[in-house]
Amino acid sequence: MASVLSPQTKSSLAATHPFTCNTCLVAFRAHEAQRNHYHTDWHQYNLKRKIADLAPLSSEVFAEKILHRQADTQLERERATFEKHCAPCNKTYYSGNGYVNHVGSHKHRQNPVGEEPAVAESAALAEKVESLNISNDSTPTPSVTALPLEACLFCPYVSPSLTLNVSHMSKAHGLFIPEATYLVNLPGLIKYLGEKLVFGNMCLYCNKQKGGLEGIRTHMQDKGHTMLAFETEEQQVELGQFYDFRSTYSDAGEESSSSDEAAASRSKAAGGEEDEWEDEDDNGEAWETDSDTSIDSTNLGSIPIDRYELHLPSGRSVGHRSLARYYRQNLRDHPAAPARRAVEYRRADDDDEEEEDDDEEGGEARAVARRGETGMIGATTSQKRDVQKMHKLAQAEEQRGRRRFEAGVNRQANSQKHYRDPLLQ
């Protein structure tokens, strides 16, 4: 037999109970009882408490904890094996609370099939849940009444009228009624939302169920769900019975009819020849043109040079779209159009001057600018020298910067750590 040890009686019991357990603070008369104690759950549990610097438990307290644990395990096992099928709604529930909430919901009550069996099943289920002591929330809820139209959906405040109630919910809670222009049954919408809260205990935005009206109100205020869900097609169908969008159908019909008339007119106009069409001017005289060769009237004076280039009267040249990749090229040192025209004018002037100076100077050859120097046309010799000098200075500065960068990289490489191999010392 084991006895609990205390510091006062430890010395007196040493003679009668020589075998002790310092972990559980108990003593045994026989060595066999001590060895059996070491294999018990009580000793193993006190060992874990000793590691966590906690005081050991007596055998009575440990037995109570075991009984509570067994009761909880039995309750969880009964919850896990629960399964109930709702025939009118064709749904299966694996939780007692979920099935009770479904039976009391507005959707289940709207189903006319099997109302009496459903009520009987809900009553029997409530009695079973009460007998199992699952929770206080699983007991049958008392009968509830629907919210009046003047009552706020999110708080206990009651307004004098429906209009003031909607205004209160909009200002105090941020309620926004979507597509208010096409809303034709505002009282029906507010009544439906109230029944969804009272009977279904469902959130108006996420359709999540909570326990009771106050619980779902607290959920909507904490989560910011004081609004209506009107985004998906399913949500729009749910609230669509209170709206009338027929006024929008007429506009769509007029647009479709106008588009059909336009298509018919185009098909009628295209009923003639494909390559030619006939138009009529203000005087009533008809004229014909070829669609393959017709061009804009502003380009009638254009002169085609070849199949890939067209000269306009303004002096510009238009290229074919197949050569667009070449027109987008930015050639280096290639002069722009004004510079090219200046070169041409200068060459023409030089030709005239050469013809005049042939007799006087013996026909001195005309100097032609080399490629890449057309940008210096009109500059004096001193200006050209200054530009060349600045160009050389820029090149020298670039080389010095490159050398400084390479020197910095080399210095960093020289600063790397070197580890000696101790075997080679």
Image (cartoon, rainbow, N blue to C red):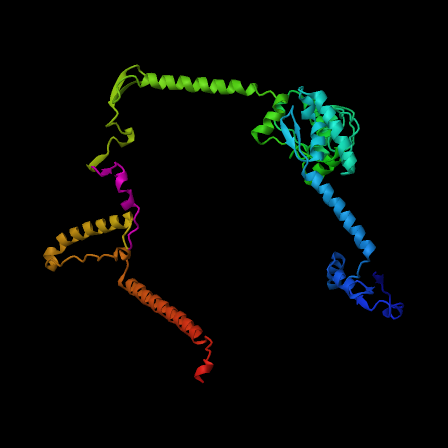
Residue 316 at least partly seen: no
The quadrant holding residue 213 is top right
Q: Residue at x 78, y 35 (%)?
A: 131
Does residue 399 belong to the magenta stretch? Answer: no
Q: Nearer the viewer, residue 305 or 242?
A: 242
Image quadrant occupied by the N terminus: bottom right
Q: Residue at x 41, y 18 (%)?
A: 260
Looking at the picture, does residue 12 appear above or below residue 115? below
Looking at the picture, does residue 156 appear above or below residue 181? below
Q: Residue at x 79, y 61 (%)?
A: 56
Q: Is residue 183 left or right of residue 299?
A: right
Q: Is residue 412 left or right of residue 225?
A: left
- Return the x and y of residue 206 as percentages of the image width and height: 64, 35
Q: Nearer the viewer, residue 149 or 128?
A: 128
Image quadrant occupied by the C terminus: bottom left
Q: Residue furthest bottom?
A: 425
The quadrant holding residue 209 is top right
Q: Nearer the viewer, residue 105 or 235?
A: 105
- Return the x and y of residue 7 as percentages of the image width and height: 87, 68
- Return the x and y of residue 277 as percentages of the image width and height: 27, 20
- Return the x and y of residue 184 as percentages of the image width and height: 64, 20
Q: Nearer the viewer, residue 220 or 208?
A: 208
Q: Is residue 363 left or right of residue 51?
A: left
Residue 6 at least partly seen: yes
Q: Which residues are magenta?
A: 307-332
Does residue 322 belong to the magenta stretch? Answer: yes
